[in-house]
Image: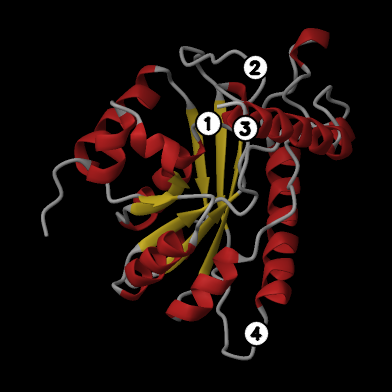
């Protein structure tokens, strides 16, 4: 079936990246399967991560990724029609089963489904705890897990920082790991641990080999604490996430 929304969106994104002269490096593109379903699993450090993770899959094999995203994005007047047109999958966080079923169906039909197993952006720029949904849907659909790690995207737009979508010459690293094949005997919790361990090594590599260092004391915010940056530690970041979630729950309760 012809697609009318996704191709022009891809072209527009690539044009914007070129106009900003983003120094995008894609490593491991050969791991993108040419056909068949796959669960693309990415870390989450920026509001733009779906663009770059999707670019990795597209450059690697012209694959279009159907990302699972919270339903708020689908309710927006501008982003909603685009998300639906690109066949992304709306997730209702109060009842995720319909989205899960839709994702498994898409995988069985040979689609690449994109998942952020941390669920929210990591303020510490390290990996948060992973949910097991990606492993479960891969097992149910008989599809491999495809680990992807992004680095540098947080410098453009991330949680708690002003967006800087016109910043030029920013290096962005996209690492694509070897697919993780599942067997019926694999337990989702153990597979998720394997996946997170593999992505931890990939993230360490991306951070270590990133071609730019902070320009000075005021430019250390995008570096994780364990590398000498001023991003919050994972423990502090988790506390901030919990406080934010509590505040949102209170606002909803107040109507």
**231 to 82, vertically: above or below:** above
Tag 3's secondary structure? Answer: helix
Q: Earlier in the sequence, mark 2 or mark 4?
A: 2
Label 1 to label 2, Cα distance in Å?
11 Å
Q: Measured from the top left, where is residue 207 in percent x and y?
A: 72, 39
Closer to the camera in the image, 19 or 71: 71
Residue drawn at 11 percent across, 60 percent down: 1
Label 2 to label 4, Cα distance in Å?
40 Å
Q: Which residue corresponds to mark 2?
A: 161
Report the colour scheme: secondary structure
Q: Which residue corresponds to mark 4?
A: 186
Label 2 to label 3, Cα distance in Å?
27 Å
Q: Earlier in the sequence, mark 1 or mark 2?
A: 1
| Disc 2 residue crowd, few under 14, some 14–19, many 20+, Cα 10 Å | few
Label 4 to label 1, Cα distance in Å?
32 Å
Label disc, if present, on residue 255 of the rendered structure: none
**212 to 182, vertically: above or below:** above
């Amino acid at each position: 079936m012809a697609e009318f929304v996704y191709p022009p969106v891809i072209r527009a994104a690539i044009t914007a990246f070129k106009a900003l002269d983003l120094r995008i490096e894609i490593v491991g593109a050969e791991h993108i399967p040419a056909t068949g379903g796959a669960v693309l699993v990415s870390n989450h450090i920026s509001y733009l991560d779906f663009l770059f993770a999707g670019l990795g899959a597209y450059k690697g094999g012209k694959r279009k990724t159907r990302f699972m995203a919270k339903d708020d994005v689908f309710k927006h007047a501008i982003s909603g029609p685009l998300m639906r047109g690109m066949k992304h999958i709306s997730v209702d966080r109060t009842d995720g089963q319909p989205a899960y079923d839709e994702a498994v169906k898409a995988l069985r039909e040979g689609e690449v489904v994109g998942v952020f197993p941390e669920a929210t952006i990591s303020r510490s720029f390290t990996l948060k705890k992973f949910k097991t949904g990606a492993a479960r849907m891969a097992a149910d659909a008989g599809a491999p897990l495809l680990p992807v790690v992004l680095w540098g995207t947080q410098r453009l737009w991330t949680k708690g920082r002003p967006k800087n979508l016109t910043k030029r010459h920013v290096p962005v690293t996209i690492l694509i790991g070897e697919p993780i094949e599942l067997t019926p005997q694999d337990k989702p919790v153990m597979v998720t641990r394997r996946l997170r361990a593999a992505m931890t090594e990939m993230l360490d590599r991306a951070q270590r080999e990133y071609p730019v260092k902070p320009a000075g004391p005021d430019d250390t915010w995008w570096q994780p604490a364990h590398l000498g940056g001023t991003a919050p530690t994972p423990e502090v970041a988790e506390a901030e996430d919990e406080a934010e979630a509590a505040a949102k729950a209170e606002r909803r309760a107040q109507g």
